[in-house]
Structures are given as C-alpha cells and as structure tokens.
Image: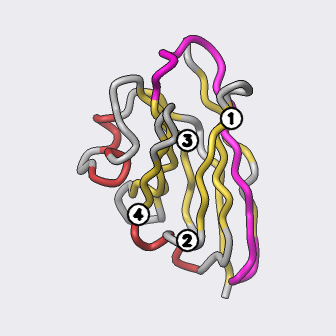
Amino acid sequence: QVELVESGGGSVQSGGSLRLSCAVSGFLHSSYSMGWVRRAPGKAYEGVAGIDSDGSISYVDSVKGRFIISRDNAKNTLYLQMNDLKPEDTAMYYCAADSLRRAAEFILSTDLEADFGYWGQGTQVTVSS
C-alpha cells in the first residue's frame, strides 16, 4: 500500500519561511504526480502546487513567487519551500499523489478529494501577523 507522510509544519511570523517534506512509501506508479493541498478552518480544500515526474510544475496564483515545489525521485520525497509566509497561508497542508493525474490538475481540480487517490495525514502551518 501507498503511504504519504508530511513533516516540517510549524508556527512562524509573517514573512518567515518553512520547508515541508512528504515521504512516499509503498508502491506507486513511477509516473505519478504529487502536490500539496491545503485547507484552512471553514474553507474548502485548495490546491497549492503540483509537480509531475517529468518536472512540470503548477502553482496557485496566490503562492507564485513565494513557494517552490520540488521532488527527489531517488528519495521518493516531495518538498515545498514556503517563503514570505502570510497569515492567509495558515492551513493544514496535505501531500497528495495519483498515478493518473497531472500537476496542473492540483490547481484546476474542483474536487481534489475525488481526483487524487493518495493523501497524507497533514502538517499544520500557522502564520501569525
């Protein structure tokens, strides 16, 4: 079975940085896409960034220029470098993956839970003003 485990969340001041990691274990097709999804209290899931096995990347407009998604295929690990964090970035951040989806679908999807088959437990990011 596939397991995704996030780490790296925490509490920071506005303008600070965090680096999230997602370790993948178990079988997952080599061409799988991975990405980050967040959910703030009382709000819907929002796709933050996605990356394909070929390196194609998509970001939601609100994080462009501040966040960087990357993956190390040899280590089966996904990363999200989060810079210039803002209070509106406060949310639970989840790693998600699917062998049939593309990076852009993390941003374009209107039903993230239905479209992506594998999810981690989440890591909390809190940004204070």
Give the mark nearest the N terminus, 1 or 4: 4
Residue 16 sits inside the magenta stretch = yes
Q: Spatial distance from mark 1 to mark 2, Cα to Cα? A: 24 Å
Q: Residue at x 70, y 44 (%)?
A: 21
Which numbered tag is attached to residue 95? 3
Residue at the disc numbered 4: 60
- The residue under label 2 is 89
First of labels 4, 3 by sequence position: 4
Badge number at residue 31: none
Of the residues shown, which amino acid type is indicated by label 4? Val
**Element marked by disc 1:** strand
Q: Looking at the rendering, in which quadrant would you find the N terminus? A: top right
> For residue 126, what is the image quadrant?
bottom right
- Tell me, yes or no, whether the highlighted magenta stretch contains residue 64: no
Q: CA distance from mark 1 to mark 3?
A: 14 Å
Q: Give the residue at the far left of this rendering.
A: 110
Residue 60 in the image, given as x and y percentages of width and height:
41, 63
Reading the image, the residue beneath label 1 is: 72
In this view, the residue in front, 18 or 119, is: 18
Q: Are marks 1 and 2 in contact (CB under 8 Å)?
A: no
Q: Name the secondary structure under disc 2.
A: helix
User: Dot 4: what SS?
Assistant: loop
Instruction: Tell me which label, 2 or 4, sits earlier in the chain.
Output: 4
State the residue at coordinates (30%, 35%). 115
Give the left or right position of residue 101, taking residue 95 as reference: left
| Residue sitting at x 66%, y 46% | 79
Mark closest to the chain's N terminus, 1 or 2:
1
Amino acid type at mark 1: Asp
Residue 114: image location, x then y, percent: 29, 35
Which residues are the magenta region?
12-32
| The C terminus lies in quadrant | bottom right
